[in-house]
Image (tube, rainbow, N blue to C red):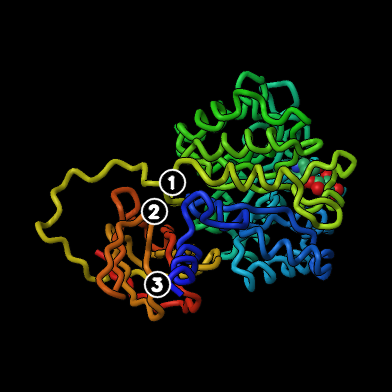
């Protein structure tokens, strides 16, 4: 009996090394996500959806959010296929990456045929506005602009956007995107930018540095990571940390590796795990048969849905690394603060905020949650969110907020960089918690100062 009790206790308290048994749960231990590309027409395949819902807590629609699908003719929008994926994600606690708003490929011919700059600018801005508005509040990060740089070069590639609007089209797209959904992270996404010394990497790096220095809104860079059989270049981690040092999150957005060697996958995952602003990894498909390059068998599950050996290498590599930091999306004000002395106790009248809570991942014994704090109709300079857990949940690690608990009562306060929010602006904090099964959503109270 005593032996049984000890065995049961050991089962309930896994050691950190074996803390989680799925990719998503293991990534969540350090505050990261593990995602995959999903095709809407495969959701009814139960082998596919079983693996999807067991292993992955972030989803990128493989094709369904691309311009060709979403605005096949001018002003006529079709979000049906993408809605199907978003609704699947919502009902399975998965978050979404939006892919992609402005891209030269999978672009309907009516767009490529535009030659007038004013027309193209308003068509591009309208496309961004309509699509982001439709999915507002449901997207963690958008690939606002995809693959705008030329191979082997520091320059932009030729495209209708580049040729008609000039270099400024990328900046225009990001500014428009921020104005539509200030809570979504805005990413630039590209391939062959993983090797630090490559011209294309340097071109994208210079653009991000320039955007940051001028206050153009950009929050993240997606490294597609479509690798050959050798896996990532040896400089990959250097590249990730150099970009992160500019003040953006970095993410691996479309990972696949020819022949899927375990070593190549582990090296890739480790590069991300060693960079605190590398917030997550997405593989570009579930089974080899789902891959755009299926002849290379580049994924973590074979065509029958069995785990390949690379799966275990990835799971293990996700088990150690620095916790992810997730600084807020909202860009700090760039205006100089007023020199007039504020009243000694500034009036808080009119300042208010609201907060919404969502469980973004769940596994046996634990969960990850995100709270979005939104300022009311006046700007605020601090916020406090309080709630009561009803099912004995406890918080084990938090980011972007200082959290104190007393019994079931939780108080979350802003940290130095995310207390100030403009009217209507949002920021997000998150945490990992333990739970014993029932994990109801608490109701939140937000107060602003
Ligand atoms: O995987 C996608 C495939 O189904 C499409 O036919 C293809 C069309 O260009 O796009 C693939 O996804 C691409 C992604 O959107 C952007 N980076 C390269 C990916 C692989 O081609």
Q: Quadrant of residue 96?
A: bottom right
Q: Nearer the viewer, residue 223 or 305?
A: 305
Residue that protrudes farthest toward the left in the picture: 344
Q: Secondary structure at mark 1?
A: loop
Q: Nearer the viewer, mark 1 or mark 3?
A: 3
Q: Is residue 159 left or right of residue 5?
A: right
- Residue at 63 percent across and 42 percent down: it is 252
Is ligand 1 within 8 Å of the beta carbon of the residue shown at mark 1? no
Q: Nearer the viewer, residue 150 or 321?
A: 321
Q: Identify whether 147 is placed above or below 35.
A: above
**Residue on which the image places disc 1:** 325
Label 3 CA crowd tier, 10 Å (few <14, some 14–19, many 20+): many
Residue 110 visible in rendering: no
Which x, y percent locates residue 378?
33, 65
Earlier residue among tags 1 and 3: 1
- Tag on residue 399? 2
- Tag on residue 393? 3
Q: Quadrant of residue 93?
A: bottom right
Whether label 1 touches label 3, CB < 8 Å: no
């Amino acid at each position: 009996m005593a032996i049984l009790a000890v065995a049961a206790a050991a089962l309930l308290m896994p050691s950190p090394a074996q803390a989680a048994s799925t990719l998503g749960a293991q990534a969540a231990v350090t505050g990261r996500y593990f995602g995959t590309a999903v095709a809407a027409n495969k959701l009814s395949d139960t082998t596919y959806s079983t693996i999807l819902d067991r292993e992955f807590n972030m989803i990128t629609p493989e094709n369904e959010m691309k311009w060709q699908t979403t605005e096949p003719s001018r002003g006529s929008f079709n979000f049906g296929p993408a809605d199907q994926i978003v609704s699947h994600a919502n009902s399975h606690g998965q978050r979404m990456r939006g892919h992609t708003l402005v891209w030269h490929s999978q672009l309907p011919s009516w767009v490529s045929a535009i030659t007038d700059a004013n027309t193209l600018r308003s068509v591009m801005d309208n496309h961004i506005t309509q699509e982001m508005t439709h999915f507002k509040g449901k997207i963690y990060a958008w690939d606002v602009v995809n693959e705008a740089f030329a191979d082997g070069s520091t320059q932009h590639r030729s495209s209708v956007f580049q040729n008609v609007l000039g270099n400024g089209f990328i900046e225009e797209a990001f500014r428009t995107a921020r104005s539509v959904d200030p809570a979504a992270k805005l990413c630039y996404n590209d391939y062959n930018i993983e090797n630090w010394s490559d011209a294309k990497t340097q071109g994208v790096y210079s653009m991000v540095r320039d955007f940051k220095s001028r206050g153009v809104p950009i929050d993240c860079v997606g490294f597609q990571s479509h690798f050959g059989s050798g896996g990532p270049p040896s400089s990959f981690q250097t590249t990730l940390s150099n970009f992160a040092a500019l003040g953006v999150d970095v993410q691996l957005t479309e990972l696949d590796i020819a022949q899927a060697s375990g070593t190549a996958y582990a090296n890739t995952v480790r590069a991300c795990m060693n960079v605190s602003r590398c917030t997550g990894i997405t593989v570009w498909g579930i089974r080899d048969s789902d891959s755009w390059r299926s002849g290379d068998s580049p994924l973590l599950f074979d065509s029958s849905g069995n785990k390949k050996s690379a799966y275990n290498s990835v799971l293990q590599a996700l088990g150690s690394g620095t916790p992810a930091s997730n600084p807020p999306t909202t860009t700090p004000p760039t205006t100089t603060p007023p020199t007039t002395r504020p009243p000694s106790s500034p009036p808080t009248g009119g300042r208010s905020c609201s907060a919404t809570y969502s469980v973004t991942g769940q596994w046996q014994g634990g969960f990850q949650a995100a709270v979005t704090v939104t300022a009311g109709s006046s700007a605020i300079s601090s916020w406090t969110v309080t709630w009561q857990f009803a099912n004995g949940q406890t918080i084990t690690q938090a980011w972007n907020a200082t959290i104190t608990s007393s019994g079931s009562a939780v108080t979350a306060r802003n940290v130095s960089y995310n207390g100030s929010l403009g009217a209507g602006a949002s920021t997000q904090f998150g945490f990992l918690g333990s739970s014993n099964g029932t994990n109801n959503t608490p109701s939140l109270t937000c107060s602003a100062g």
